[in-house]
């Protein structure tokens, strides 16, 4: 009987120890069940991820549903081995529609199509985009307005069959024309073209455009942005304001002479009357 009692007691102790070890382990899994929400786009259209403690490039790419190569491509500041990743670093995940943004009134970027080449095409097209420094803010590029470096351009098929993102540059070609950011071998279809301006700029035109492209065409587009530091020039004072002082001086002189004349006349009128009294 003692053996049965000790056997039962040992079994109860084993069960208690088992539940004591497994229940905390299950409770520690609860934070993993919290759903992750992809960051919302900023006003300029960029989707930014803030690096947290324990993150690495592979986990960030997997968490946000993008490829590791795309993460490196959109964040050239990262080392190839992700060794310089630190908490608090901002990483660009992509470009999307802004959560709350009202574009400055201005025309939408109108694409232009280059003349077709006589050589046979491969069934794809090229889309070339320029982000230019809109100095006067009129959303129309002038010859003296050149490219802006550090922006992001995204070309995405509406059905998800194609997507690519590249950075804008501020360089000139042999003809002193701004170099555009080009997407080659783009399949024929309908695309959403989005632009994200760099820090310190405000867009002066629409930042998204739906584009229909046909095979063999080369489409040129331009988006404008203006520096936040540009301020309106002070107005030049009107030149006629300085002319008031000579006019007032002339009028004052005339009144002074008139007063002197009247005084002299009054003096002359009084002289005859004094002589008459003396007689």
Image (cartoon, helix red, strand yellow):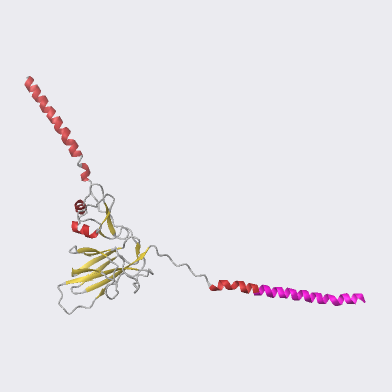
**Magenta residue span:** 250-279
The prevailing secondary structure element of the residues shown in magenta is: helix
**Position above or below: 91 against 222:** above
**Vertical comparison of 234 with 38: above or below:** below
Q: Nearer the viewer, residue 213 or 167?
A: 167
Residue 217, how many percent across, how many down? 21, 74
Residue 263 inside the magenta-drawn segment = yes
Residue 10, located in which quarter of the rendered image? Answer: top left
Q: Which of 164 and 79 is in front in this view?
A: 79
Q: Which residue is drawn at 19% across and 36% down?
A: 24
**Residue 200 position within the rendered picture, expressed as x and y whole percent measured from the top left:** 35, 61
- Above or below, 55 relative to 195: above
- Residue 180 point in image, percent of width and height: 26, 70
Looking at this view, name the residue that lies furthest to the bottom.
118
In the image shown, does 269 or 161 lie closer to the viewer? 269
Locate residue 14, reporting x and y percent.
12, 29
Q: Which residue is drawn at 17% across and 33% down?
A: 20
Residue visible at 10% across and 25% down? 8
């Amino acid at each position: 009987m003692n053996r049965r009692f000790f056997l039962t007691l040992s079994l109860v102790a084993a069960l208690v120890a088992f539940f004591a070890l497994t229940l905390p382990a299950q409770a520690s899994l609860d934070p993993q069940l919290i759903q992750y929400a992809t960051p919302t786009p900023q006003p300029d259209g960029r989707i930014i991820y803030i690096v947290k403690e324990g993150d690495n490039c592979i986990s960030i790419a997997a968490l946000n549903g993008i490829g590791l190569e795309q993460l490196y491509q959109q964040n050239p500041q990262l080392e190839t081995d992700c060794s310089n990743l630190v908490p608090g670093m901002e990483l660009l995940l992509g470009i999307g529609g802004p959560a709350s943004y009202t574009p400055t009134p201005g025309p939408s970027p109108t694409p232009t199509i280059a003349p077709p080449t006589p050589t046979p095409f491969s069934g794809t097209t090229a889309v070339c985009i320029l982000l230019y420094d809109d100095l006067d803010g009129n959303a129309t590029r002038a010859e003296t307005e050149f490219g802006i470096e550090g922006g992001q351009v995204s070309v995405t098929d509406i059905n998800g069959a194609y997507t690519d993102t590249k950075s804008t540059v501020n360089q000139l070609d042999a003809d002193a024309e701004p170099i555009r950011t080009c997407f080659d071998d783009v399949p024929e279809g309908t695309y959403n073209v989005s632009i994200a301006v760099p820090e310190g700029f405000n867009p002066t035109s629409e930042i998204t455009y739906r584009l229909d492209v046909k095979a063999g065409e080369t489409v040129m587009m331009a988006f404008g942005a203006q520096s936040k530091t540009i301020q309106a020039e002070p107005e030049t004072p009107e030149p006629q304001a300085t002319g008031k002082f000579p006019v007032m001086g002339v009028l004052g002189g005339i009144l002074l002479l008139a007063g002197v004349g009247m005084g002299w006349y009054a003096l002359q009128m009084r002289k005859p009357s004094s002589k008459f009294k003396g007689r």
